[in-house]
Structure formats: C-alpha cells, structure tokens
C-alpha cells in the first residue's frame, strides 16, 4: 500500500512559480514510476508530467514543456513538480500518482495510487 500526500499549492500571479511536493509512504516508492496530473473545474483529468523510478526518464505534456520540471528524491520518498511561468490556464487541482512499474507513464490508467490533490490557482 502506498499513501501519497501533496502540498505546495496556492494562489499565484501569472508568471509566478510554485513547487509542488508529493510525500509517499511505503517501501515501494523507489521502484515506482510517478506522475503528476491535473483537473480543471468541469474538465477531465489530464497528464502533466511523469518520472521513472530512477529519475533518468521524464516526459511532459506539451502544454507545460519548458515551464514545468518533475524530479524525485528517493531518499526522502518525495516527488516534486517545479512550475515556472505559470499561466491562468494552469489553474487546476494537481494530483500525484504512483504506479506499480518503474517506468514513467503518461496515462492515468497506468497508476494504482493517487493523492488527494492540491489546488493551484493562477490569477491574471
């Protein structure tokens, strides 16, 4: 069993930055591919970024490429999402997810565990 707790969300002006953290419990974190997804009000959940268990492979949605960076610290059982140059369209609830496999994954269906989410609001 893996429990995920996100933090770091909040209100920020357009052009600003936030860093989201996702703390994981359980012994399998270092062998799990991790991902960040987001869901805007009234819209479907969408993939944002993913990282392999080793941290060597990362993938991003086109909408965030060049602005967001995913990273992980396996010693701290934590995955991060650094968000720069934020735009109003980045406003959403952001969710951390863990999968059984070590590879990065871009589909929500590949993930077994989900956090409760943290809200990000970007004002114009």
Image: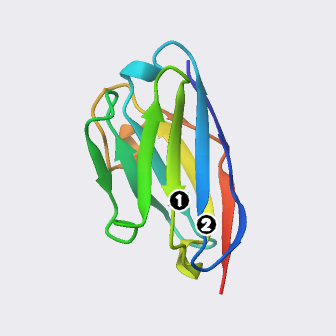
Residue at the bottom extreme, as displayed: 124
- Residue at the spot 56% in from the left edge and 63% down from the top edge: 39
Q: Which residue in the structure is indicated by mark 1? A: 38
Residue 60 rendering spot, x and y as whole percentages: 33, 57
Question: Of the residues under marks 2 and 1, which one precedes in the sequence?
Answer: 1
Residue 15 rendering spot, x and y as whole percentages: 57, 78
Residue 61 vs residue 81, the one in the foreground: 81
- Residue 25 is left or right of residue 53, and the answer is right
When the figure is inspected, residue 59 is found, relative to residue 113, above or below; the finding is: below
- Residue 85 is left or right of residue 57, and the answer is right
> How much space separates mark 2 and mark 1, taking CA atoms?
6 Å
Query: Circle 2 sits in a helix, a strand or a loop, which is it?
Result: strand
Residue at the top extreme, as displayed: 27
When the figure is inspected, residue 117 is found, relative to residue 15, above or below; the finding is: above
Residue 92 numbered mark, or none = 2
Q: Are marks 2 and 1 in contact (CB under 8 Å)?
A: yes
Quadrant position of the C terminus in the picture: bottom right
When the figure is inspected, residue 77 is found, relative to residue 115, above or below; the finding is: above
- Residue 29 is left or right of residue 13, and the answer is left
- Residue 5 is left or right of residue 98, and the answer is right
Residue 94 rendering spot, x and y as whole percentages: 58, 55
């Amino acid at each position: 069993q893996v429990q995920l707790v996100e933090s770091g969300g909040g209100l920020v002006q357009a052009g600003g930055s936030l860093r989201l953290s996702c703390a994981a419990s359980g012994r399998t974190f270092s062998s799990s591919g991790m991902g960040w997804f987001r869901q805007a009000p009234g819209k479907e959940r969408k993939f944002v970024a993913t990282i392999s268990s080793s941290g060597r492979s990362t993938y991003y949605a086109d909408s965030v490429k060049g602005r967001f960076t995913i990273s992980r610290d396996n010693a701290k059982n934590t995955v991060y999402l650094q968000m720069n140059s934020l735009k109003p369209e980045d406003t959403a609830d952001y969710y951390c997810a863990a999968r059984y496999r070590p590879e990065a994954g871009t589909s929500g269906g590949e993930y077994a565990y989900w956090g409760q989410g943290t809200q990000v609001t970007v004002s114009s």
